[in-house]
Amino acid sequence: MSPVVQTLPYVAWILLAALAFGSFAFVVLTRHLTDATRGYLGFTSVCAGLIAVLALVVDSGLPAPTDLAIRHALSEPIRQGFMLVFATVAFVYPIALRRGAGAPLTAGILGLGWLALTLFGAALGWAPTPADAVPLFVQLVVLSLATGGSLAAIILGHWYLVTPKISEKPLVLQARLLLGVVGLQVLLFVVWTTLGGGPGQDAWEALSGGNLLLVVLRLLVSLLFPLVLTWMAWRTALTRSMESATGLLYINLAAVMAGTIGAAALYVATGLLL
């Protein structure tokens, strides 16, 4: 099996997991920091659960990475079990929202805990050494927040189109969170390209090898461009121009997803962290 064919299922898993985990994390944060409606929170949580199920299906068919930079994970059944539990919590979360009291907080903490375990299990299983698993885990977490958070913001933007009188606080919060997450990605990009981060990745290696064009595109198209877009969406949401903010967030989601795909492919195939 060629390296490209081996890479694609792993990239698909990372993208689907990022969409599921990040969107659920934004649901939990939005629930406890704003007055977001139960309809939006429940719908987005169910979407996260459905995407997690798709990721679980992909996980069950991952090929052995014989020609890739990652190693074969012996803990696949454990990781798949974590994913299944997370999906279950995501499906149950709308019920917890209706019960009130401490049920949403308990379900949210459980969901966040299981998604963290799943990502850590993936990092520990795929990284060549436990030390390499730490930066990979950080990368997976940040990719999840950026990608899934962008999806959650898109869904929220559409909620304003059908219920325009709801508070602007949820979208303002999510735009600010995305701005912070993308800003963190830019800082990590600088650290990893100048100091190294992936298995065997030397300082400045990413900027001097054959992947230079991909590295530059990662910075310009999927980091700096979304940074500008999320800032514009935040400022636009403050003025309650929700249609404009949603349009900006659509473009942001496309750019962020492209960056997630590229970053995942580079790490899986070459071991570069970006």
Image (spheres, helix red, strand yellow):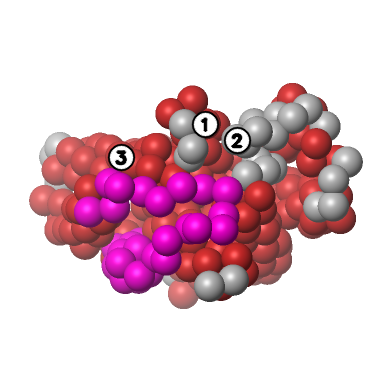
Find residue 223 and report its horizontal and vertical position in percent: 74, 48
Left or right: 22 in relation to 8: left
Contact between labelled residues 1 and 2, with CB atoms less than 8 Å apart? yes
The amino acid at mark 3 is: Leu
> Disc 3 to disc 1, how far (Cα)?
17 Å
Secondary structure under the numbered disc 2 in the rendered image: loop
Residue 74 highlighted magenta (yes or no) = yes
Image quarter of residue 77: bottom left
Q: Vertically, is 109 above or below 61?
A: above
Instruction: Name the foreground residue: 109 vs 257.
Output: 257
Secondary structure under the numbered disc 1 in the rendered image: helix
Q: What residue did someone put label 3 on?
A: 117
Question: Which numbered tag is attached to residue 35?
Answer: none
The amino acid at mark 1 is: Asp
Tell me which numbered mark, 2 or 1, is placed earlier along the sequence. 1
Residue located 49% across and 37% down the image: 128
How many residues crowd around disc 1 within 10 Å: few (fewer than 14), some, or many (20 or more)? some
Q: What residue did someone put label 1 on?
A: 132
Question: Which numbered tag is attached to residue 199?
Answer: 2
